[in-house]
Image (cartoon, helix red, strand yellow):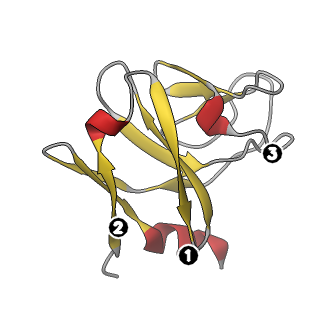
Amino acid sequence: MDMNWISIGDISDIPLRGARCVKTPQGKVAVFRTAENEVFAIEDHCPHKGGPLSQGIVHAKAVTCPLHNWVISLETGKALGADEGEVRTIAVRNENGALYIALESLMMAAE
């Protein structure tokens, strides 16, 4: 299946160890930039109580939810440690700093 890549701006729009929230027809997506300049995208709600992950603390390849400190892997979308649950991950492409997300990956997961 061909991916439908949607431009979401430039990597410089996201601070190191930071995030931004992108609104899509399928819901909010949190796009994260790690200290190593890796970019990940996951659904912007914690599997625990729906906290805004885009407002959490980024460390290594994980984010800590601002509400109840659940730690979510940016690579897998799974809760780490003793917590259980997961969010969908969204494919991201970085072309010389220009960022794109694949909306198909959101729609397929929603079906």
Point 55% across, 75% down: residue: 108
Point 55% across, 48% down: residue: 42
Amino acid type indicated by mark 3: Gly
Q: Position of residue 25 (x, y in %)?
A: 58, 73
- Mark 3 and mark 1: Cα distance apart in space: 19 Å
Q: Which mark is residue 12?
A: none
Tell whether label 1 touches label 3 (CB within 8 Å).
no
Q: In the rendered image, which quarter contains the N terminus?
A: bottom left
- Mark 2 and mark 3: Cα distance apart in space: 25 Å
Circle 3 sits in a helix, a strand or a loop, which is it? loop
Amino acid type indicated by mark 1: Met
Looking at the image, which is closer to me, 35 or 89? 35
Q: In the image, which is nearer the foreground, mark 3 or mark 1?
A: 3
- Mark 1 and mark 2: Cα distance apart in space: 13 Å
Point 28% across, 39% down: residue: 11
Task: Say which quarter of the image contains residue 39.
Answer: top left
Q: Position of residue 22 (x, y in %)?
A: 51, 54
Residue 54 sits above or below residue 66 on the image: below
Circle 1 sits in a helix, a strand or a loop, which is it? helix
Residue 54 sits above or below residue 21 on the image: above
Tell whether label 3 touches label 2 (CB within 8 Å).
no
Q: Position of residue 86 (x, y in %)?
A: 70, 46
Residue at the left extreme of this rendering: 96
Task: Say which quarter of the image contains residue 65.
Answer: top right
Circle 2 sits in a helix, a strand or a loop, which is it? strand
Q: Position of residue 62 (x, y in %)?
A: 54, 26
Return the residue at label 2. 6
> How crowded is the residue under tag 2: few (<14 C-alpha within 10 Å), some, or many (20+)?
some
> How crowded is the residue under tag 1: few (<14 C-alpha within 10 Å), some, or many (20+)?
few
Return the residue at label 3. 50
